[in-house]
Image: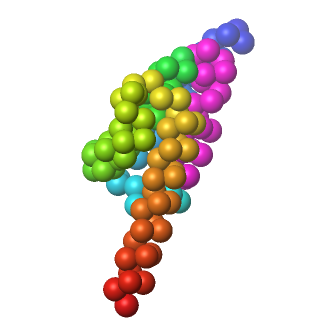
Amino acid sequence: MAYRSISTQSRVSKQELHNLIDWSSTRPMKDEDNMVDYFDDFRTLADPLVSSCYMSRRESNKLFQQGFHADNRTMLYPQLIGRHPLQKPGADFDYQVLFNRIHAIFAQWRLEDKAAKAKAE
């Protein structure tokens, strides 16, 4: 009886995770705050699924990447390749590692935008 309950709960949680990914992939992330919000929401839903073996870590990593809007993936691809030429961005990045790298990229872009605005003034 308990197994059926856990399985049903896991299916609901996995559907919620897919709903988050679908929703997130339709909205470009503008800055590291958007990135943190997505990461926190993703982790809240994915970590219990991985720890209960209802979803593999590899599947979790792949799903995390799917939550990015196509524009974000296009903008981030050269940055990720430039920093890690031996590993393709679509490869099995651990989602925590990917979050750290992308968060740093967004932060750098924000600083560059600030510097450009200050220089223009």
Q: Position of residue 3 (x, y in %)?
A: 67, 10
Q: Is residue 44 above or below residue 104?
A: above
Which one is nearer the viewer's eye here, 109 or 27?
A: 109
Q: Position of residue 63 (x, y in %)?
A: 44, 30
Q: Is residue 85 above or below residue 78?
A: above
Q: Is residue 70 visible?
A: yes
Which one is nearer the viewer's eye here, 91 or 59?
A: 91
| Part of the protein shown in magenta | 35-54
Left or right of residue 58, residue 88 in this image: left
Q: Is residue 30 above or below residue 48?
A: below
Instruction: Assess whether residue 36 is covered by the magenta stretch.
Output: yes
**Image quarter in which the C terminus is found:** bottom left
Q: Position of residue 33 (x, y in %)?
A: 53, 59
Q: Residue at x 40, y 71 (%)?
A: 113
Q: Is residue 11 above or below residue 82?
A: above
Q: Position of residue 96 (x, y in %)?
A: 57, 36
**Image quarter in which the N terminus is found:** top right
Q: Residue at x 55, y 44 (%)?
A: 100
Q: Is residue 15 visible?
A: no
Q: Residue at x 49, y 20 (%)?
A: 58
Q: Residue at x 45, y 66 (%)?
A: 110
Number of residue marks? 0
